[in-house]
Image: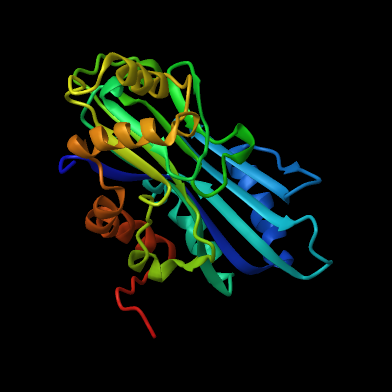
């Protein structure tokens, strides 16, 4: 769908070889300035600092994986919205100057489709079952929230009205998918690696269900409501439904990412490392 817009949310960046001699006073300065206290956990990363100046502006820092051996230097991660990076530039500059390298770990890639949610038909190509909770479709368990391919589909206008208490007109459905490459990407080269999701999910805009017999129309609606998945149907029924979907307008996630990825990552990459490379080596 040509008027679908891509954006990036919740980006996670990794700084390698950050020395404890830097992190210890850095941590204390952050706590003093923002009036927060560090959290210490026994799983994942040990030290956590969470800055939340406003409900919609946050910056999370984590340091030293619990399972790593004792060392003078450890990995540090940050998590925030790309739009918040500029506000926390002094922190980013300090981290950049005290890390051996900076790597992209994952982010949420959002596709905003200007259609009501009941017309947006999404299905997993890998057999991942859909769950429906309070109107949102989830592909994956809550415990898989940070895993590659975790997906949720929801009414973006409804969500904005609820969070910001604004009267937003129009129809907008958001498909949000976690992009987590198998190998971490140097942040300066991220522009070269747009995500690919067509192998994970299909997405069609249902504009005409009339060609379907009532039985198969009910099957499509059952999938839409999270009552069944495509894998629950016989091969014959799946083929019939797939033929219908092919006649509808589709959302090509890969093409949209190819076209809009650079404009979404070029500024965050420049803020994080100061350089952007568009040329692949090898």
Q: Is residue 103 left or right of residue 24?
A: left
Q: Residue furthest bottom?
A: 282
> Which residue is outermost to the front?
236
Considering depth in this image, is 200 or 22 the residue closer to the camera? 200
- Judge left or right: residue 246 versus residue 269: left
The quarter of the image holding the N terminus is: top left
* Picture quadrant of residue 34: top right
- The quadrant of the picture occupied by the C terminus is bottom left
Q: Evaluate whether residue 14 shows in this view.
A: yes
Depicted 137 relative to depicted 134: above or below:
below
Q: How is the image coloured?
A: rainbow
Count the marks: how many? 0
Q: Nearer the viewer, residue 90 or 213?
A: 213
Residue 181, how many percent across, how many down?
49, 60
Q: Is residue 128 left or right of residue 223?
A: right
What residue is drawn where x is 50% and y is 54%? 180
Extreme-right residue of the structure: 70
Q: Nearer the viewer, residue 125 or 69?
A: 125
Q: Residue at x 60, y 32 (%)?
A: 142
Residue 75: x and y in percent read: 66, 63
Q: Residue 204: which quarter of the image?
A: top left
**Residue 7 horizontal/vertical position (percent):** 31, 45
Place residue 235 in its image quadrant.
top left
Q: Residue at x 33, y 74 (%)?
A: 277
Q: Would residue 109 be visible to someone looking at this image?
A: no
Residue at 56%, 61% in the rendered image: 14
* In this rendering, position of residue 50 left or right of residue 28: left
| Residue 225 position in % (x across, y down) | 42, 19
């Amino acid at each position: 769908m040509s008027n679908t817009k891509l954006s990036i949310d919740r980006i996670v960046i990794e700084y390698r070889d950050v020395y404890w001699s830097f992190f210890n006073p850095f941590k204390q300065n952050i706590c003093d300035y923002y009036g927060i206290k560090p959290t210490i956990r026994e799983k994942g990363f040990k030290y956590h600092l969470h800055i939340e100046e406003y409900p919609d502006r946050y910056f999370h820092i984590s340091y030293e994986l619990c399972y790593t051996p004792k060392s003078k230097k450890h990995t540090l991660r940050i998590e925030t919205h790309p739009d918040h990076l500029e506000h926390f530039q002094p922190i980013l500059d300090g981290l950049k100057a005290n890390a051996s390298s900076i790597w992209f770990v994952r982010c949420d890639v959002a596709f905003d489709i200007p259609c009501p949610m009941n017309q947006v038909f999404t299905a997993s190509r890998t057999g991942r079952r859909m769950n429906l909770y309070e109107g949102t479709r989830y592909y994956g368990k809550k415990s898989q929230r940070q895993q590659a391919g975790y997906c949720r589909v929801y009414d973006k206008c409804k969500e904005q009205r609820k969070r910001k208490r604004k009267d937003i007109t129009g129809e907008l459905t958001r498909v949000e998918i976690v992009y987590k490459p198998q190998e971490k990407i140097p942040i300066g080269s991220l522009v070269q690696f747009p995500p690919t999701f067509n192998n994970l999910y299909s997405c069609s805009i249902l504009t005409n269900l009339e060609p379907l017999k009532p039985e198969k129309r009910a099957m499509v609606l059952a999938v839409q409501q999270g009552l069944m998945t495509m894998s629950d149907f016989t091969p014959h029924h799946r083929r019939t439904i797939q033929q219908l979907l092919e006649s509808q307008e589709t959302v090509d996630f890969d093409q949209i990412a190819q076209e809009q990825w650079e404009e979404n990552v070029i500024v965050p990459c420049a803020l994080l490392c100061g350089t952007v490379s568009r040329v692949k080596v090898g």
